[in-house]
Amino acid sequence: MDLNQVTLPVSNMDKAVAFYQVLGFTLIVDTPHYARFECLIGQSTFSLSLEPEPTMNGVVIYFEHAELDCWVSDLQAKGIEFAQLPKDERYLWREAVLFDPSGNKLKLYWAGDNRLNPPWRVKS
């Protein structure tokens, strides 16, 4: 089994599409009510769905990049604001936090081998 995509609700499609393009994702589907992006590495995608009513959810989307600090600096130079700059977390990931124009929470991170093999991984 493989994860196909995650869809985020957005309140303004034009602003949302522009935001994710600034982050560097490749737009592969563009309609007034739906957009889909390809991630820079691998075969993962994610999409945006225009929602007439604001939705509150507890979903956090994580995007991994080996050069996290450089990526964040580049994004700041393009006007992207962060709620948290890159910081080493207790669970051995380095993370930065930001919100898209619709309020969806994003974490840009680097975990290296700890993403799939943390010291507390369940033994099989």
Image: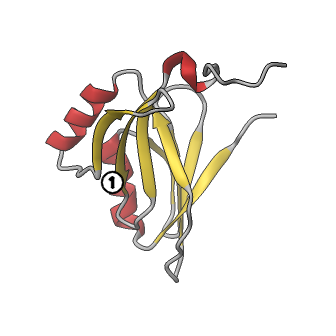
Position of residue 17 relative to residue 92, above or below, is below
Q: From the viewer's perspective, is 78 left or right of 5?
A: left
Observer-nearest of 3 and 18: 3
Q: Residue furthest left?
A: 77
Question: In what quadrant of the picture does the N terminus appear?
Answer: top right
Toward which corner of the image does residue 118 lie, by quadrant? top right
Q: Position of residue 70 (x, y in %)?
A: 25, 26
Q: Position of residue 114 (x, y in %)?
A: 56, 21
Q: Position of residue 29 (x, y in %)?
A: 53, 52
Question: In what quadrant of the picture does the C terminus appear?
Answer: top right
Position of residue 12 relative to residue 45, above or below, is below
Q: Residue at x 36, y 47 (%)?
A: 97
Secondary structure beneath dot 1 equals helix
Q: Residue at x 17, y 49 (%)?
A: 79
Q: From the viewer's perspective, is 9 left or right of 5?
A: left
Mark 1 crowd level (few <14, some 14–19, many ≥20, 10 Å Cα): some
Q: Residue at x 27, y 49 (%)?
A: 82
Return the residue at label 1: 19
Q: From the viewer's perspective, is 124 left or right of 81?
A: right
Observer-nearest of 78 and 58: 58
Q: Residue at x 35, y 38 (%)?
A: 24
State how many labels appear: 1
